[in-house]
Image: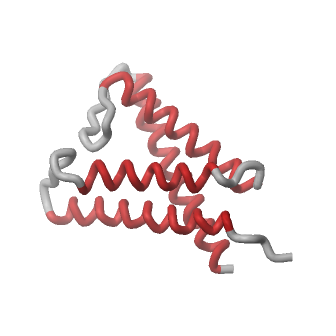
Amino acid sequence: MVARILRLYAYLYHLIFAIYLFGISLIAWLSNNTLKMPFLPWSGESLQAWLMGGAVTGIVSIVLAVTGIFRFLFPLWALTMFVVLFRGFIFPGFYTYESRSEFTQFLLIILGALIAFLASLTLFSRKRR
């Protein structure tokens, strides 16, 4: 029961995250604007492509995990998102914070990603009959 709740949290967290990424990249693409996200390793046109591809990969991995077709892709997606967020927001030189509350907000996002990754590992447990 706890594993199901944790899995549901992981699915919802990453679904919201993927839809957010998709929306940002779609709006930037439709408005011909260049995205600037200093915490990510990409910039310009490649950033839009990576965000769109990442969003689609995230949604597909969630759908495959929920349906049970290929559930091992989702933990890889969750780990990748945690690493990208941790690298971008914690390591010095990638992102600077304007206030303590902004830093706390990003710490909560990273903590949520970590919990979602750990929850995604419940996909490796055996099913009871």
Q: Residue furthest bottom?
A: 1
The residue sitting at 70% across, 48% down in the picture is 64
Q: Residue furthest left?
A: 98
* Of the pair 113 and 19, the residue shown nearer to us: 113
The residue sitting at 59% across, 71% down in the picture is 6
Image height of 59 relative to 116, above or below = above
Does residue 15 appear to the left or right of 51 in the view shown? right
Does residue 47 appear to the left or right of 71 in the view shown? left
> Looking at the rendering, in which quadrant would you find the C terminus?
bottom right
Residue 110: give x, y in percent of width and height.
Answer: 36, 61
* Of the pair 125 and 33, the residue shown nearer to us: 125
Q: How is the image coloured?
A: secondary structure
Image height of 44 relative to 106, above or below = above
Tell me which corner region of the image, top left, top right, bottom left or bottom right, holds residue 94. top left
Residue 18: give x, y in percent of width and height.
Answer: 51, 46
* Of the pair 26 and 107, the residue shown nearer to us: 107
Image height of 107 relative to 17, above or below = below
The count of marks equals 0
Residue 27: give x, y in percent of width and height.
Answer: 42, 30
Does residue 59 appear to the left or right of 115 in the view shown? right
The residue sitting at 47% across, 68% down in the picture is 115
> Looking at the rendering, in which quadrant would you find the N terminus?
bottom right
Residue 35: give x, y in percent of width and height.
Answer: 31, 30
Image height of 83 relative to 3, above or below = above
Tell me which corner region of the image, top left, top right, bottom left or bottom right, holds residue 34. top left
Q: Residue furthest top?
A: 32
Does residue 3 appear to the left or right of 114 in the view shown? right
